[in-house]
Image (cartoon, grey):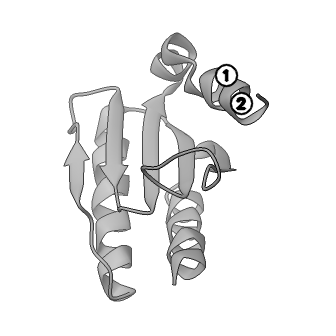
């Protein structure tokens, strides 16, 4: 089920023209989730549309979203599906936060 939801989320990100989509399997290092997905959005309005589309798609997979932080005015939207955490960043926010480096360091310990 988890793999199907992950594939569905990636498809939504691609269909909604998100860029630089990266997926990390953190199941062996994180007690919180199995996957982290990071994608770049062009602007916060696109991010809001993407988060709504992800929620719809996840519901169609008979799952749910635990929570969404951020909106059409914020450069970072976090979507908690439970097993999968999705981060949508504008390009500048993604560079500023540099979450990929933190994840990659923790995976390479």
The percent coordinates of residue 70 (x first, y second) are 22, 36
Q: In which quarter of the image is the C terminus?
A: top right
Say which residue appears at 23% left-offset and 60% top-offset.
66
Judging depth in this view, the residue of 84 and 16 nearest the camera is 84
Please give the label number shown on residue 43: none
Q: Is residue 9 left or right of residue 49?
A: right
Residue at 63 percent of width and 28 percent of height: 100
Q: Is mark 1 on a helix, strand or loop?
A: helix
Residue that badge 1 annotates: 101
Give the vertical position of 67 relative to 91 (above or below): below
Residue at 55% from the left image edge and 42% from the top image edge: 39
Question: Can you give x and y, in whole percent of width and height, for residue 11 in the image?
Answer: 58, 69
Q: As drawn, which residue projects farthest toward the right?
A: 108
10 up-or-down from 67: above or below: below
Whole-percent x and y of residue 26?
62, 49
Residue with the mark numbered 2: 104
For label 2, count other residues whose C-alpha is less than 10 Å away and answer few (under 14), some (14-19) or many (20+). Answer: few
Q: Distance between the residues labelled 1 and 2?
A: 5 Å
Q: Tell me whether circle 1 and circle 2 mark residues in contact (CB < 8 Å).
A: yes
- Indicate left or right for 78 with 98 as reference: left
């Amino acid at each position: 089920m988890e793999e199907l939801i992950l594939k569905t989320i990636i498809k939504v990100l691609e269909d909604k023209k998100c860029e630089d989509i990266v997926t990390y399997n953190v199941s062996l290092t994180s007690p919180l989730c199995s996957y982290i997905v990071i994608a770049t959005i062009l602007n916060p309005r696109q991010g809001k549309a993407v988060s709504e589309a992800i929620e719809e798609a996840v519901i169609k997979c008979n799952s749910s979203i635990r929570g969404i932080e951020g909106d059409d005015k914020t450069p970072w939207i976090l979507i908690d599906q439970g097993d999968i955490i999705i981060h949508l960043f504008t390009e500048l926010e993604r560079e500023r936060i540099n979450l990929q480096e933190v994840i990659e360091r923790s995976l390479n310990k």
